Structure formats: C-alpha cells, structure tokens
Amino acid sequence: MLELLRQPWPWYVAGPLIGLTVPALLLIGNKALGISSSLRHMCAACVPAGIPFLTYNWRAEIWNLFFVLGIGIGGFVGYQLMGHPDTVAISAETVRDLKTQMGLTDFSGLLPKELFALENLANWKGWVFMVLGGFLVGFGTRYAGGCTSGHAISGLSNLQWVSLVAVIGFFAGGLLLTWVLYPLLF
C-alpha cells in the first residue's frame, strides 16, 4: 500500500478524488472548499483589534482552520514517511528550456534554488519574486474573493459566474507572467 502512495497518481484518479471533496463538504456540513479564507479566520482569532473585516464569529468557521492544519500535517507526515525524490520528474524539453531560456541549472530539489532560496532575498530579483510576488498573490486572492482552489474547484462546480471570471483571470495572468513579464526579468 505504501508503495502505491509513493508513486504519482494519474489525473483520472487524483482529479475525481479532489472533485468529490466539494460535494462531500456540501453534503456533510454545507461548507465550501477554499483555503485562503483560513488566513482571515486566523487573523480574526489572533488580532482582536476591532477591525470591521475581522469582526465576525470566526469560531463558526473553525473547521476550515482544522482543514488547513490537516493539509500541513499531512504534507509533513507524507514527507517524513515517503521521503522525496532526488529530482522532480520533468520532461527533458522543459529542462532544456529552463536551462537555455532562464539560466536555471539546479534541479536537485522540489523548486529551483536559483529562484526560491532564502539567499535570494539579498538581491532585487529575490525581492520581486518572493516579497512583491507574495503580496500580489495575497492581494489578488482577496480582490478575487478567493484563491484558485476555492474558485476553480468549488466555485466552478457550483456554477458560479464570478468563479469562472476569476479562473479566466488566473490563467490569463499566468500566461502574461510566463510569456511576457518573466522573460523581461531574466
């Protein structure tokens, strides 16, 4: 059984399992799947400053905090029990493109160290990618009323128009960043 969990699952198994989470949450507790709202709940619990946006009954949404805690614990336990691959399995064409077009060379971890190492905060590119990028993701999540998992999985399955618009915006922004802005920075 552990060997089955160690290998990648095909999309036709993992996708429906993720997709079935939405109706399960709706049927069991009338809850919507989403991760970004947990930050609001944590701030409401820890920062009792009378800020109107954080003044609500966060205890009614405590299930969401346990859900996110379970994701973190599950990731940690999975890493400890199953380890991690020495290199991530990506296509040779992608490796070639990352080397030639973006100058990335170290593929030994889960993320390219040239982009995601703490030492990168000492230069302007590191600040752009990590700090400004993190701010923009947080702002966009709040502005769109949810994150990609909430809109793409939960919102689309509930046929919400705003989620369709948000997902189109996520994809358009990703394409713009990948094909226009990212090459300008490298």
Image (spheres, rainbow, N blue to C red):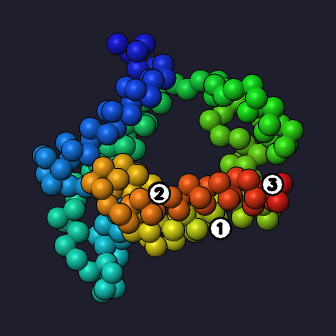
Q: Amino acid at mark 2?
A: Val
Q: Position of residue 34 (x, y in %)?
A: 34, 55
Which quadrant holds residue 101? top right
Q: CA distance from mark 1 to mark 3?
A: 17 Å
The residue pinned by badge 3 equals 183
Q: Quadrant of the C terminus?
A: bottom right
Front of the two marks 1 and 3:
3
Q: Earlier in the sequence, mark 3 or mark 2?
A: 2
Residue, disc 1? 132
- Residue 83, percent across and down? 51, 24
Task: Give the numbered dot on residue 167.
Answer: 2
Expressed as whole percent of the image width and height from the top left, the position of residue 4 reads 40, 15
- Where 165 falls versus 99 (above or below)? below
Q: Nearer the viewer, residue 151 or 31?
A: 151
**Is 137 drawn above or below residue 17 in the view shown?**
below
Q: How far across and how far down the image is residue 123, in percent?
A: 80, 62
Marks 3 and 2, how far apart at CA: 23 Å
Instruction: Tally the marks.
Output: 3
Q: Residue at x 50, y 58 (%)?
A: 168
Q: Are marks 3 and 2 in contact (CB under 8 Å)?
A: no
Which residue corresponds to the image point at 35% horizontal and 13% vertical from the top-left?
Answer: 1
How would you rate the neighbour count of disc 3 (Cα within 10 Å): few for under 14, some for 14-19, many for 20 or more?
A: few
- Which residue type does callout 3 highlight? Pro
In three-dimensional space, the C-alpha distance between marks 2 and 1, rounded to whole angstroms, equals: 21 Å
Asked whether, in this view, residue 145 is left or right of residue 178, the answer is: left
Q: Is 30 positioned to the left or the right of 179 in the image?
A: left
On the question of residue 90 being in view, the answer is yes
Farthest-out residue, left = 28
Along the line of sight, the residue nearer the viewer: 87 or 101: 101
Residues marked 1 and 3 touching at CB (< 8 Å) = no
